[in-house]
Image: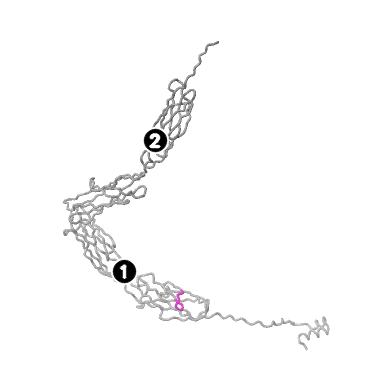
Amino acid sequence: MDNALGFTLGAVGTTTSVTANPAIVEEGTTTTLTAAVTPQHGSNGVAAGDVRFEVDGVLLGVAPVGANGRASIPYTAPLLDNRDPVTQTVRARYLGDAPRFAASGWTTNTVRIDPEPKSEVTSTVGLTATRGLVENGQLPVTLDVAVDTSSGTDLPEGTKVEILRDGVVVDTIAVNGVAATYTDHLDADVAEETVYRYTARLLESETYDTIYRGAESDPVDVTLAAETAPEVTVAVDPASVLVGRAVDVTASMTAGGEPLPAGAEVIIRANGRDIGTVTTDDDGSATLADHVFTTPGDKTIEAVFEGALIDGMYYLPVTSAPATLTVESLPEVDSGTTIELQTEATAGDEVTITATVSRLDGRELTDAGTDDLGSVWFFSDGEAIGSAPVTIDPETGEATAVFTHRFGERGEYRMTADYSGASGSDEVIAPSETASATVVTVTTSEIVIEEPGPPEPDPIMVGSLDLGSVTDALGEEGLSSLTGMFGGN
C-alpha cells in the first residue's frame, strides 16, 4: 500500500483598487469606473470573476474581470439640484473566482460632480459726452453709456459701470437694461486749453447660469478752453421778394470787434425752422445763397451759433437779432373761358367741344412764365364728362382745350366748362368758367323703310317678229291664240 499525502490549497487572497476617469465630471456626463484586481501572492494574475461597483452605497452594476485583471463600468453623473459641486463615494469589491482566488474587501474612491458651466455673454460699451451750459462756473458733462450684448438681451439687474475721468474712477452707477447715464461737473474757468478723457468700464456680473463679461469703452475727450461771448448778425438781400425768387441770407460773427476765425457753423432759421447751415470764412461771414421761399408772408430770419471750440478758444452760443423778409404773392391775372361746339347733333355721333382760354388784360397766357397752362373741365347738365389740357393752337395762336364727346340719347344738353388756372414764375392766372351754357339738341337718326307691295309680273319681250315665219310654224289657229295673249285684235 502506497503511502500518499493529500492536502488542499486555500484560495489566494486578492486586493482591489478602484479609480474614476475622469475623476471630476460635469453633471449629466459620463465617467468610467475601473477596478484593478491583484493576487496577494503568487505569480498568476487574476483574469476571471466579477467586480461589484457601488456609488454612495447603491449598486451600480457588476462587471467581469478581463485578462488584464481589470473590470470597468460606465457611470453617468446625475443632474444637480443647484450649482454647488457634489462629491460621491464610489467603491468596488472583487467577488472571487473559486477555488483559485478569494473575494477581496471593499475599496473606495471619490468622484466630484460639477455643475454645467455658465454661458458667457460679452459686450461692447459705447460712450458719448454732451456738454451743457455753464452755470455757477461749472460745466455739466452728460455721459451716456450704451451696452451692446452678444446675446441681444438686457444686462441683469444690479450690473454696474464705472465712470473714469483721466483713468480715475469718479463714480460707479447702475445699468438699466443696457444703458446708464452720469453727469460730471467740471470747473469751467480755465486759463488754457484743458482736455479731460472719459471712459466707461462695465463690471463683470453673474446670474444663476450666465456670466456677463466686463468691457471698457473707447475714450471720449472733452476739451475746455477760455470762453468768450461772440456776436452774430444776419442780413437778407433783397428785403422783399416774390414767391419763388431767390434771396441771399448772410450771417456775420465777431468777438471783441474782430471776425471769428474761419470754420464757425451757423444755422439759418426762418420762422423758427432751420433752412440751412453755413460755415464762416476768414472774414467771419457766411452766406446761404439763392434760397427760395415757396409761401408768401413775412419771414423772421435768425442766425444761430450753438457754440464751438475754435483755435483754443471756446465761443459761447449766441442768436442774432431777427431780420424781416417780406415774401409777396405773385400777381394774379383774371382769365376768361368760352366754348364752341355744334348745337345740333345726332345721338352716337362724336361732337368736338373747343374751349378757348384768354387773359382779360389781352396778353398771352404764356406771359405768366410757365409751359403748364392748366386744363379745362367740361360739363353736361352740371355733370363732369371729361377734361383736356390747355395748349397753344399753332395756327391761330389761341390757348385752347379740345374734348370729344358722344351723346348717347336724344334731348337737350346744357354744356359748360371750367378753367383750372395756372401758376407761373411771374404771375398766377386765375381760374374762370363759361359765362353761360351752350345748349346742344341731340336727335336720333332717321332711317326710311318702304312698305313692300305685290310683285309685278315679269314683262314678256316680244320684240320684232317675222309673222310669216310664225304663221308657217303655228298655223292660223296658233297665231290667233298668240295674238290674243298680248291683247292683239
* Depth check, front residue: 69 or 61: 61
Protein image colouring: one colour
The dot on residue 295 is: 1
Amino acid carrying mark 2 in the image: Gln
Residue 44 percent across, percent down from the top left:
46, 21
Task: Work out whether 177 lies above or below 239.
Answer: above
Residue 252 percent across, percent down from the top left:
21, 61
Amino acid carrying mark 1 in the image: Thr
| Quadrant of the image occupied by residue 456 | bottom right
Q: Tell me the element at label 1.
A: loop
Q: Is residue 381 magenta?
A: yes
| Quadrant of the image occupied by residue 313 | bottom left
Q: Check the picture and name the quadrant holding the C terminus.
A: bottom right
2 with respect to 461 (left or right): left
Task: Work out whether 403 lies above or below 107.
Answer: below
Residue matched to label 2: 88
398 with respect to 329 (left or right): right
Residue 403 percent across, percent down from the top left:
46, 74
Which residue shows up at 27% across the image and 60% down it? 277
459 with respect to 295 (left or right): right
The dot on residue 20 is: none
Local packing at callout 2 (Cα closer than 10 Å; few below 14, some 14-19, many 20+) is some
- The part of the chain drawn in magenta is 379-385
Q: Residue furthest front?
A: 1
